[in-house]
Image (cartoon, rainbow, N blue to C red):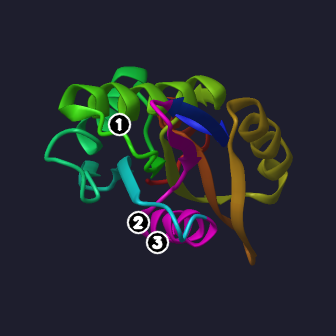
Amino acid sequence: MLLIEQSSEVHHTVNHSRFIGFALPCADERELRARLSQVARQHADAHHLAFAYRIQTGQGLATYCTDAGEPGGTAGRPILAHLEGFAVVNAVVAVIRYFGGIKLGAGGLVRAYGGTAKLALEAARLIPYVEYTHIRLSIAYPDLQPLTYALGKAGGEILAKDFGARVDLTVKLPAPEAPAFLARFGGKP
């Protein structure tokens, strides 16, 4: 799976209708709503704002698409198909349409919305998706420096520290690294 590291905006014209595509990262539904609101405000005079998203949640992958007033299945589904085809998660692809006076028909709409979504995803900078886990640790003071070094090598970070008789930590690291890390330093997910 992939994530959007850098957003994109593309412009595409089909039979005088102008399509503007956005590929935007969003970690959760709150951020998704904020991104869509921003796009809608920027293009308040647009005729349609169709979109699709895929967000990884604790309960699995959440997906949704909307045709935004276009005939059923002609806008949202083609956008979602490209999100799935590119295997992008934690992202929304939105396509704005400014009607140009010529009806495109169902097939034309599918090609226009899908094509704009594809262009937006191709223009975005994509990186591999890494699932992270949080671990709580209680270590002796001399183990703090080796743990910090090992955590850095594993691509993790310390989220919280509490210094007492021992050092209590909450760390975040890539899930595939967790078993080796737990074996070396103890702790619990």
Disc number at residue 30? 3
Give the vertical position of 47 relative to 177 (above or below): below
- Spatial CA distance of label 2 from label 1 is 18 Å
Q: Nearer the viewer, residue 157 or 101?
A: 101
Q: Residue at x 68, y 43 (%)?
A: 156
Q: Quadrant of residue 7?
A: top right
Of circles 1 and 3, the one toward us is: 1
Disc number at residue 79? 1
State the residue position of label 2. 29
Residue 98: x percent and y percent?
Answer: 48, 51
Residue 148: x percent and y percent?
Answer: 80, 45
Assign a secondary structure to mark 3.
helix
Whichever of labels 2 and 1 marks the residue nearer the N terminus, that label is 2
Query: In this image, 150 relative to 111: left or right?
Result: right
Q: Residue at x 29, y 58 (%)?
A: 68
Q: Residue at x 75, y 78 (%)?
A: 164
Magenta stretch encompasses residue 31? yes
Q: Nearer the viewer, residue 15 or 147?
A: 15
Q: Residues within 10 Å of mark 3 (few under 14, many from 20)?
A: few
Magenta stretch encompasses residue 35? yes
Residue 99: x percent and y percent?
Answer: 43, 50
Identify the amino acid type marked 3.
Answer: Arg
Highlighted magenta segment, given as a residue range: 14-42
